[in-house]
Amino acid sequence: MGATRRYGPGAIGLTLAFSIGTAVPLAIVALAGGELLKRVRTLRGQTRLIRRVGGVILIAMCLAMAVNLTDGAQRLVPGYMSTLQNDVEEKTFAENQLAAVKGVPTGNLGDCTANSSVPDRCGRAPAFTGITAWLNTPHDAPLSLADLRGEVVLVDFWT
């Protein structure tokens, strides 16, 4: 919804549903933790301290995320989907499907040269077809290759 910049009842409903879905498990953990603290004798006298330390840790983590201190850790930990993605992308099935698309030359993209004297060494880009929604274009209107000629463009396809 942030990418489409469209906010309305659906966006508000989704946000509320997400909030409730996050709040309920947190409330259960908080209540269960409180009961645990009441029952364990050694922790009974430390309840106030434990809550304060937990609050400080929570605020510190929020601040760290707000100023992007956690980005480095996210890059160090491999994505859980990377194995699946590599498994799909490195199969000949995917390569064959891509090669079967009209206007795409067979062979490796590594054969393309950035400074080639032949402008379309790797084939011309096919027209955009079958796209159901456009994001971040003027008035979210469809584009054509003729509209983009002479421009540097990054096209990101979401599936």
Image (cartoon, rainbow, N blue to C red):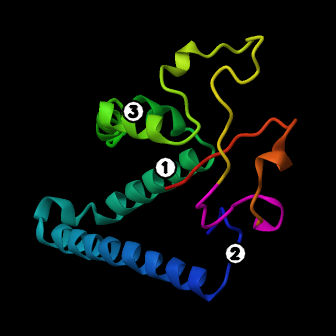
Q: Quadrant of the N terminus?
A: bottom right
Residue at disc 3, secondary structure:
helix
Left of 6 or right of it: where is 54?
Answer: left
Give the CA distance from mark 1 to mark 2. Answer: 30 Å
Report the label total. 3
Q: Quadrant of residue 114?
A: top right
For the residue pair 65 and 11, the one nearer the viewer reads as 11
Main SS, magenta residues: loop
Between label 1 and label 2, give the one nearer the viewer.
Answer: 2
Residue at disc 2, secondary structure:
loop
- Amino acid type at mark 1: Met
- Amino acid type at mark 3: Glu
For the residue pair 82 and 60, the one nearer the viewer reads as 82
Residue 52 is marked as none
Residue to which mark 3 is pinned: 95
- Amino acid type at mark 2: Arg
Residue found 62% across the figure and 46% down from its top: 156
Left of 54 or right of it: where is 46?
Answer: left
Residue at disc 1, secondary structure:
helix
Asked if the stretch drawn in magenta spans residue 103, the answer is no
For the residue pair 51 and 122, the one nearer the viewer reads as 122
| Highlighted magenta segment, given as a residue range | 129-140
Residue found 51% across the figure and 79% down from its top: 14
Residue 6 is marked as 2
Asked if the stretch drawn in magenta spans residue 132, the answer is yes
Give the CA distance from mark 3 to mark 2. Answer: 36 Å
Residue to which mark 1 is pinned: 61
Give the CA distance from mark 1 to mark 3. Answer: 43 Å
Between label 3 and label 2, give the one nearer the viewer.
Answer: 3
Q: Residues within 10 Å of mark 1 (few under 14, many from 20)?
A: few
On screen, 146 above or below 140?
A: above
Q: Earlier in the sequence, mark 1 or mark 2?
A: 2
